[in-house]
Image: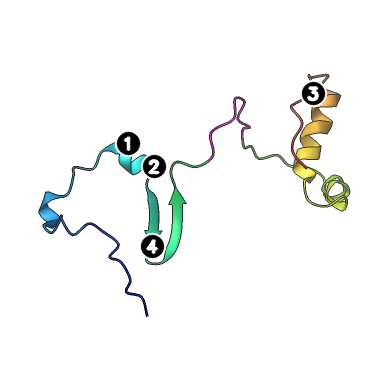
Amino acid sequence: MPRKKPAGSADWSDPDDAPELTSEMLDTAEVFDGDRFVRRGRGRPKADAVKEQISVRLDPDVIARLREAGPGWQSRLNDLLRVALGLAEAGKRAA
């Protein structure tokens, strides 16, 4: 059976000689909690026009009608409001 090569360099044996961590290194680091992957870098870049989360009260029958069409009902509500207010059409979303 072939012998497995060591993962790291044998030259570095003193953990106190580790390089100083910079914020740039931490921003792009892959983070693990044990064997579970937690995050890679800083995530998806922010869009040019970020949507704002609000709370609004709607009649139950209005919500039921929007939800009948399935997932994506909140985006469809946003599109309906844009048309009703005469606003420019937002960028097309990937299906």
Q: How many labels does the image show?
A: 4
Label 2 element class: loop
Q: What residue type is labelled 2?
A: Thr
Q: Mark 1 or mark 3, which is nearer the start of the sequence? A: 1
Q: How crowded is mark 1: few (under 14 residues within 10 Å), some or many (20 or more)?
A: few
Q: Is residue 48 magenta?
A: yes
Q: Mark 4 or mark 3, which is nearer the start of the sequence? A: 4
Task: Give the residue number, with chain letter if any, for mark 1.
Answer: 24
Q: Is 38 or 58 nearer to us in this picture?
A: 38
The residue at 79%/23% (across/down) is 89
Q: Is residue 47 left or right of residue 90?
A: left
Q: Which amino acid does label 1 sit on?
A: Glu
Q: CA gap, disc 3 to disc 4?
A: 43 Å
The residue at 85%/46% (across/down) is 66
Q: Mark 2 or mark 3, which is nearer the start of the sequence? A: 2
The magenta segment: 44-52
Task: Give the residue number, with chain letter if any, for mark 2.
Answer: 28
Relative image position of residue 11 (x, y in whole percent): 15, 55
Task: Give the residue number, with chain letter if any, for mark 3.
Answer: 89
Relative image position of residue 85 (x, y in whole percent): 82, 22
Of the 4 image quadrants, the one containing the C terminus is top right
Q: In which quarter of the image is residue 47?
A: top right
Of the two numbered discs 3 and 1 in the rendering, the one whose residue sits closer to the viewer: 1
Q: How crowded is mark 4: few (under 14 residues within 10 Å), some or many (20 or more)?
A: few
Label 3 element class: loop
Q: What residue type is labelled 4?
A: Asp
Q: In which quarter of the image is residue 92?
A: top right
Task: Give the residue number, with chain letter if any, for mark 4.
Answer: 33
Q: Is the magenta stretch mostly helix, strand or loop?
A: loop
Of the 4 image quadrants, the one containing the N terminus is bottom left
Q: Does the magenta stretch include residue 25?
A: no
